Image (spheres, helix red, strand yellow):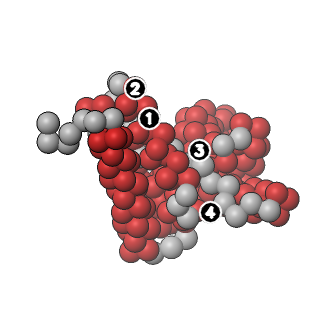
């Protein structure tokens, strides 16, 4: 669907067409679910959040401005509903951080994509992502998985683009450090086994 087709669909929905809104739901439900699920890591909660997000979107559709991408507007709602779920979860469980983001396969290197080593390294990196702050994790997910610009991420998360860039920079530095440490540990393992680094 082209941007023009989507705009026409949105305008129809804003005029009260339930059919047009159902088409918008079909268009975005998979992407929204994937985004929310990566934040919550709970299928049932993710379904509930998506349902609540589309309901809120329907109720406030007239407030949508075409100067922003519809996906950015929708993901903003989904992000805020997800945060509410996480806050409630922290209150009940006493957890400090429940975000689970899987967003940085590129850091492991494309040349390892199909190997067992790639799988192990992705696991290491993703575990490191889980240790990032909620803001850093969300920025990483929106940037790498959704292809959002820093400006768009800023609108979703309610912060300036420069702050988003700072979150991404710190996240990359943290992941880079973990990745390098993992490689050094591998070398140490080889040395212990009697294999020389130079040989």
Considering the numbered disc 1 on the image, is that residue within a helix, a strand or a loop?
A: helix
Within 10 Å of the Cα at label 3, are there few (<14), some (14-19), or many (20+) other Cα atoms? some
**Residue at (36%, 63%) from the top-left corner?**
173
Vertical position of residue 75 compared to residue 189: above or below: below
**How far across and down, in percent of the image, does residue 124 sit?**
46, 44
Q: Residue at x 50, y 63 (%)?
A: 136
Q: CA distance from mark 4 to mark 3?
A: 27 Å
Residue density around tag 4, few if under 14, some if 14–19, many if 20 or more, within 10 Å? few
- 3D distance between C-alphas at marks 4 and 2: 48 Å
Looking at the image, is mark 4 or mark 1 earlier in the sequence? Answer: 4
**Upstream in the sequence, badge 1 or badge 3?**
3
Name the front one of labels 1 and 3. 1
Q: Quadrant of the C terminus?
A: top left
Classify residue 126 as left or right of residue 112. Answer: right
Residue nearer the viewer, 125 or 167: 125
Q: Secondary structure at mark 4?
A: helix
| Secondary structure beneath label 3 | helix
Secondary element under disc 2, as helix, strand or loop, is helix
| Cα distance between the residues tagged 3 and 2 | 23 Å
Residue identifier under label 2: 116
- Residue appearing at x 66%, y 60% in the figure: 97
CA separation, marks 2 and 1? 6 Å
Q: Please state which of the two labelled residues, at mark 4 or mark 3, is closer to the viewer.
A: 3
Residue at which label 4 appears: 63
Q: Which mark is residue 120?
A: 1
Query: Badge 1, how many Cα within 10 Å: few under 14, some, many 20+?
Result: few
Residue bearing mark 3: 38
């Amino acid at each position: 669907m082209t941007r023009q087709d989507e705009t026409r669909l949105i305008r129809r929905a804003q005029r009260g067409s339930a059919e047009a809104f159902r088409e918008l739901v079909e268009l975005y439900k998979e992407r929204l679910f994937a985004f929310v699920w990566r934040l919550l890591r709970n299928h049932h909660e993710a379904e509930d959040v998506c349902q609540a997000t589309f309901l809120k979107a329907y109720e406030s559709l007239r407030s949508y401005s075409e100067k922003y991408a519809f996906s950015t507007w929708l993901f903003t709602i989904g992000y805020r509903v997800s945060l509410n779920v996480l806050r409630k979860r922290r209150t009940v469980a006493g957890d400090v951080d429940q975000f689970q983001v899987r967003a940085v396969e590129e850091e492991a290197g494309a040349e390892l994509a199909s190997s067992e080593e790639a799988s192990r390294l992705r696991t290491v990196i993703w575990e490191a992502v889980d240790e990032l702050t909620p803001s850093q994790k969300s920025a990483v997910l929106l940037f790498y998985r959704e292809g959002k610009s820093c400006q768009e991420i800023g609108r979703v998360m309610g912060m300036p683009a420069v702050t988003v860039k700072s979150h991404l920079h710190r996240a990359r530095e943290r992941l880079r450090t973990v990745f390098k440490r993992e490689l050094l540990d591998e070398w140490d393992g080889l040395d212990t086994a009697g294999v020389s680094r130079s040989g």
